[in-house]
Image (cartoon, rainbow, N blue to C red):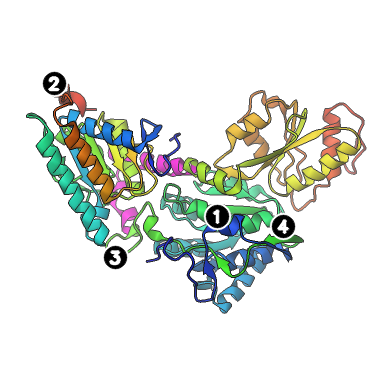
Amino acid sequence: MADTHSVIGTKNKKGQTFTDTWKMMNEAPRTPSFYTGSEVIKEALRRASCDVMIAYPITPQSEAAALIGELFAEGYIGDYFRGESEFAVMSQCAGAAFGGARVFTTTAGPGTMRAMENFPMWSGARLPIQMIVTCRGINSPLSIQPDTLEISYLLNTGMLVWHAETAQDFFDWILKGYMVSEEPDVHLPLALCCDGFFVTHTKDVVNLTPADMCLPPYDPYRSPVPCMDMECPPVRMMRDPFIMKSNYISYATHASWQQEVWAAVERSRKHTIKWINGLIETENIDAEVLIVASGTAVSQGREAIRLLEDEGIRCGLVKIKVLRPWPGEEIREATKNAKHIIVPEFNVTGWLAKEIKATIPNSERVNAGPRVCGGMTMPPEIIVSEIKALLGMRTMSLAGRGS
Amino acid sequence: MGIYLPNPGEAHINGVIVPEEKAYEEAAKQFLMAKVPTLFPGPLVLWAWNEQAAKKATAIRHLYNTLKECVQPGQTPMLIPMPDYRPKYPKINPEVEINPNHPNLTIWHNKIDCCMFIGVHCHQANLSLKIIRGGTSCYTIAMCAQAGHEDAMLSFRDASVEKIMKLTEWVRKLKGTVQPRLTSAKSGASN
């Protein structure tokens, strides 16, 4: 059994020093490195003291999964294999986590959808698996291009859901994510999402922690549920009669169980705020116009704000980092003075705008767009155009809009 | 749902974060007021997984014996184990055990009006505490080895042998100073 605290300062088989995570992430020197998002996932995993990684190839996460295979070959990962499908992968991840391992996986688009049945099961079984979701189209006809629609399906699974904007977010949040999701009062899976290709396949400067430092190992004995062993098999637990009964006691148990999962999501707020410095980030929220976004739509929003400033229009920004637990109170506070709230999104339905509308008073302030989907890029100019139109200003005609 | 759990050195009483010392006093008072103060030890202390578990079990037995010494006639302390977490069908024997999937049955049967969970895995304790809170008027205390329980009316965190012994000392200290609810306890544990 690994005792998290007793191993601090000792070395693992690769010569890395198990380091207090707070010191490693906040005090250790950082080295600027020029990496793709996929390479950043690999570098984070190198430092994550991960026991098991399982994945199935699907664009755009395949490169990250393959790179983690190299880590396994080098001896940084305890076990690594390809499942038979995404459904199999997520089931195998559950098995590894039931057994007390720190587990990591990656998926994307249709893979996420195919494996969907497993995610509420992970939450219900209180398995702190970390899953990278490199979002892509899920529709038919087949699309491998960036699109964040799949995130909306994860929001009610009982998983923690974070949405990274940059590769730097990705690096830090993979490591910090384990610290949040492994807390005994949380102990839930984390879906760490990014916009495929935009983050995974572009290079950026990322400040890395020292490669000779790694997270303390997962301590399964801090779990809120027993590890699987022959005395307490969770499958037997699930197949036992209370799920089959149609009576009040059965319903009460199920209700209590579901409430507990969502209470654990709520309890993660305290730890998430500590580790990633709040569920949202804000800039100039006293402005009348605010862009509220998550993922790479935040980056496009930043550029739009710069273009607007050139024209003398002041616009603020709310970056939503965490989608579950939902930062409702923070968003209400950040948007209380805004007259116009612009929500750019990379999906066709505008799920983020719907969430925001359901959160704030006077929701007619929310402009659910601009939205692009199917792999379309979102030039900052269309955000600028949308804002200027809302302000009653003349705006340029955009190709294909007929205006 | 909806409260922040205490930090190390703190506890909560009805969702309000308090210094741990205050919680010892309140927990001891609740035990001494109850008609059927009951300890529910779970698998983490029922089996000698390690030396610490065995020591905790001894401390819990000491707390139970102290309760028996300190209550007044008409009060009936109980020690009822939660040996495992699987639902018990067709019927649990509520006189000898409690189960997280239908803990209210044990509370009702024994007319328990104050209980303390200890050595129960957090998820299972929270399941139980929610059901007890929803279906009974039993006062719930959690002596949690991890971060505490918002669904208990009073919760300690980072449970240790020392903390169990400290609670025992408080029970002994308050002996004879707390008026038991003997007249109202008859319906205290009902739904």
Chain letter of disc 1 in the image: A
**In the picture, which quadrant includes the N terminus of chain A?**
bottom left
Q: Disc 3 designates what residue? A: A230
Estimate how packed mark 1 is, as few (under 14), some (14 to 19) or many (20 or more) residues with alpha carbons within 10 Å. few
- N-term mark: 3 or 1: 1
- N-term mark: 4 or 1: 1
How much space separates mark 3 and mark 2, taking CA atoms?
47 Å
Stretch of the chain drawn in magenta: A236-265
Disc 1 element? helix
Is residue A24 visible to us here? yes
Which of pointers 3 and 2 indicates the residue nearer the eye? 2
The answer to which of A368 and A73 lies nearer the viewer is: A73
Chain letter of disc 2 in the image: B
Horizontally, residue A33 falls left or right of residue B149, namely right
The image quarter containing residue A395 is top right
Q: Is residue A316 above or below residue A399?
A: above
Estimate how packed mark 3 is, as few (under 14), some (14 to 19) or many (20 or more) residues with alpha carbons within 10 Å. few
Is residue A83 visible to us here? no
Chain letter of disc 4 in the image: A
**Residue A260: which numbered mark, if any?**
none
**In the picture, which quadrant includes the C terminus of chain A?**
top right
Identify which amino acid the numbered label 2 is placed on.
Answer: Thr
Q: Disc 4 designates what residue? A: A199
Tell me which secondary structure the magenta stretch mostly adopts. helix
How much space separates mark 4 and mark 2, taking CA atoms?
68 Å
Q: Disc 2 designates what residue? A: B183
Identify which amino acid the numbered label 1 is placed on.
Answer: Trp
Chain letter of disc 3 in the image: A
Which of pointers 4 and 2 indicates the residue nearer the eye? 2
Magenta span contains residue B165: no
